[in-house]
Each structure stands twice: as structure tokens, then as C-alpha cells.
Image (cartoon, rainbow, N blue to C red):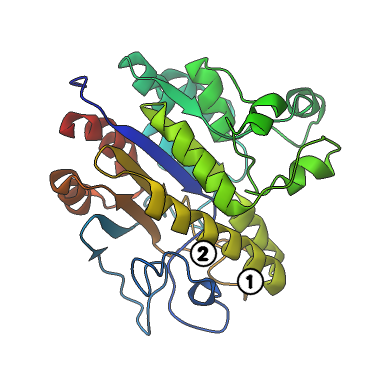
């Protein structure tokens, strides 16, 4: 049970980022993601074997995303596994892409990570900015539904951040630059990924738990467009560098993970069965070692995050 000591945890979810070796279809090495921490934290140099990497205040643990179910991992079942701790792929008997079905929505409504943490008495938020037209658009569009992360915020019954919060730096748009928000016709300023990172640092300081989703990586992987992928990975690298250098890991914890592989292999438009990275930044060595010892698959992330509050 939460002991009321202070921890501000930022859960940065990256859609479609797996671990693969150094090859011409893997642009992650050239993106220099967190190379200020380690030269190859997000790719496997000349090896198909992934092993735990760790430093003074961080660790990268490769975890399984296949959930013991045949076929390629998909977003709805992978994300719901992360956000509920339930093996929804095994429950359904298959990997479900894109949006959760009614059965998964029921599970999210019952035990989403955000709802569970809220019920522990923690101050929580979803940091992503939404347009005011998004919700009506989804309700009117048959082929688009609410994602697992959006459903998780709904389940916790906490406010969504809209345009005004984005302008004030109280929310961050999913592309880290506001370009997509502007493309929808909203009058907001372009910002850098570095500024988005600083905004996330400040949002995290004011909440026990902050969730943020970046899904440009999955879009880039499906596109197989190398220039687009370089841009997306470059923005992510800029953001992560600022987070790693500006969060106070004495009381702030940064968790980064993904739901399945994709953008690490641009030779195909589908997802991959690759392991995905689970990264933790913290000055709490006991918590770091707990993650290293216990994290094996997507299913472990839920309990690890909930249990992390016992270490502060």
C-alpha cells in the first residue's frame, strides 16, 4: 500500500518501438536516442540477444511483447496489457490491433492503471493534449474508436487537457511540436521537442503519476518512410535527452516502454515480435533493482508501477 512518501512518476509510453540489431533498416542508432546515457540503449549491437543494461541511475530491461500468443503483437492487446496487467491477447485468443473491443474496455474500466492509482489516493494526470473536436469526431466515425490510453483516462474520470492547457504548457501534444494540432486548424504556437520535455518535467512535478503517449513511432514504422522515421526518432531523442538531464531522480521517476516493435525494422510495414525496452530512471537503487529482477514482459509493468510507490 502507498505509504504517502513522495514520488512523482512519469510514464512515457512509446508506440511501436522494439529492440533490434544494427542494420540498414534500423535507424534508431543514428537517432542518438539517450546516447548521453549509453551508446546503444535502444538497439542491439551486432547481436540478436538482448541483455539488461544499467548505469548509476538508470536501467534498460528488454521485455517480451508477444504475451504467449501466436501472431504479431498489436496495439489494443499490448497497450491494455501495460495499462491493466491483464493478458488480454490470451483472453481473446488473438492479438487485437488499434482499438480495444468491448471486452477490453470493460477490463480497462475496472482496473486501468490510472484508476487504480487514483483509488490509492494519488494525484494523477494524462499529459496529452486533446482537441475539443476529437471526442465528437470519434463518436461520429465508425472506423475510429477511443484508444486504450484514452479509455484509461475516461475510466479514472479525470479531466482531459484541451487547447488552453496546451498553450499554458500544462499539456503536451502527441507529436512533441504542436504541428499536428496546428494542422487541424488550432491557433497554437509551434514548440520544440526540448520544450515539450521541459513541460513534461513540470507537469510531473505537480502529480504523483503522469501518463504520456507518443505514437508517431508506430506511424513512422507503418509508413516505411525513412525520412519520416528519422524526424520522429530525432524528436524523441531530443525529448528524452532533456528529460534525462532535467528530472530530479531523487524524487522523480521516469519509466519508458512500448507495446510492440515496429519502427526498428523499416523493411516491412507490419509490427515485429522483437523484445521492447523498459527503461527506468531513478536514484532509488532498490527500486531500480526491483525492476531489473521482476520485469519480464508487458504484463509486469502494471504491478511494477503500482509497487514503486512503496519505495518512497
State the residue at coordinates (47%, 66%): 33
Q: Is residue 38 above or below residue 78?
A: below
When asked about the image quadrant of residue 102, the answer is top right
Q: Horizontally, is 286 left or right of 129 in the view? A: left
Q: Position of residue 114 (x, y in %)?
A: 42, 25
Q: Can residue 137 be spotted in the picture? A: yes
Decide: few, some or many residues near mark 2? Use Cα within 10 Å; few <14, some 14-19, many ≥20.
many
- Quadrant of the frame with the N terminus: top left
Q: Horizontally, is 272 left or right of 183 in the view? A: left
State the residue at coordinates (27%, 58%): 59
Which numbered tag is attached to residue 268?
Answer: 1
- Residue in the foreground of this view, choosing between 245 and 48: 245
Decide: few, some or many residues near mark 1? Use Cα within 10 Å; few <14, some 14-19, many ≥20.
some
Q: Position of residue 309 (x, y in %)?
A: 23, 30
Distance from Cα at disc 2 to Cα at disc 1: 9 Å
Q: Helix, strand, or loop for circle 2?
A: loop
Q: Is residue 94 above or below residue 48?
A: above
Amino acid at each position: 500500500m502507498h505509504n504517502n512518501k513522495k514520488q512523482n512518476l512519469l510514464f512515457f509510453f512509446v508506440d511501436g518501438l522494439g529492440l533490434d540489431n544494427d542494420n540498414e533498416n534500423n535507424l534508431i542508432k543514428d537517432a542518438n536516442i539517450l546516447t548521453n546515457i549509453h551508446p546503444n540503449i535502444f538497439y542491439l549491437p551486432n547481436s540478436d540477444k538482448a541483455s539488461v543494461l544499467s548505469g548509476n541511475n538508470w536501467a534498460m530491461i528488454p521485455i517480451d511483447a508477444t504475451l504467449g500468443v501466436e501472431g504479431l503483437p498489436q496495439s489494443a492487446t499490448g497497450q491494455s496489457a501495460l495499462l491493466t496487467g491483464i493478458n488480454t491477447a490470451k483472453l481473446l485468443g488473438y492479438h487485437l490491433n488499434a482499438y480495444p473491443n468491448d471486452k477490453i474496455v470493460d477490463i480497462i474500466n475496472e482496473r486501468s492503471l490510472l484508476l487504480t492509482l487514483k483509488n490509492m489516493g494519488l494525484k494523477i494526470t494524462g499529459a496529452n493534449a486533446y482537441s475539443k473536436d476529437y471526442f465528437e469526431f470519434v463518436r461520429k466515425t465508425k472506423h475510429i474508436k477511443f484508444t486504450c490510453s484514452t479509455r484509461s483516462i475516461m475510466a479514472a474520470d479525470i479531466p482531459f487537457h484541451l487547447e488552453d492547457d496546451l498553450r499554458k504548457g500544462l499539456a503536451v501534444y502527441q507529436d512533441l511540436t504542436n504541428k499536428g494540432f496546428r494542422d487541424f486548424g488550432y491557433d497554437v504556437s509551434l514548440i520544440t521537442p526540448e520544450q515539450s520535455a521541459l513541460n513534461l518535467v513540470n507537469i510531473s512535478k505537480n502529480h504523483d503519476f503522469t501518463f504520456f503517449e507518443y505514437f508517431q513511432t508506430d506511424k513512422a514504422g507503418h509508413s516505411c518512410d525513412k525520412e519520416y522515421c528519422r524526424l520522429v526518432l530525432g524528436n524523441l531523442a531530443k525529448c528524452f535527452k532533456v528529460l534525462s538531464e532535467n528530472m530530479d531522480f531523487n524524487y522523480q521517476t521516469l519509466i519508458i516502454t512500448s507495446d510492440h516493435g515496429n519502427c526498428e525494422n523499416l523493411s516491412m510495414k507490419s509490427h515485429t515480435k522483437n523484445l521492447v525496452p523498459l527503461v527506468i530512471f531513478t536514484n532509488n537503487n532498490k527500486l531500480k533493482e526491483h525492476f531489473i529482477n521482476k520485469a519480464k514482459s508487458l504484463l509486469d509493468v502494471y504491478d511494477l508501477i503500482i509497487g514503486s510507490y512503496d519505495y518512497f
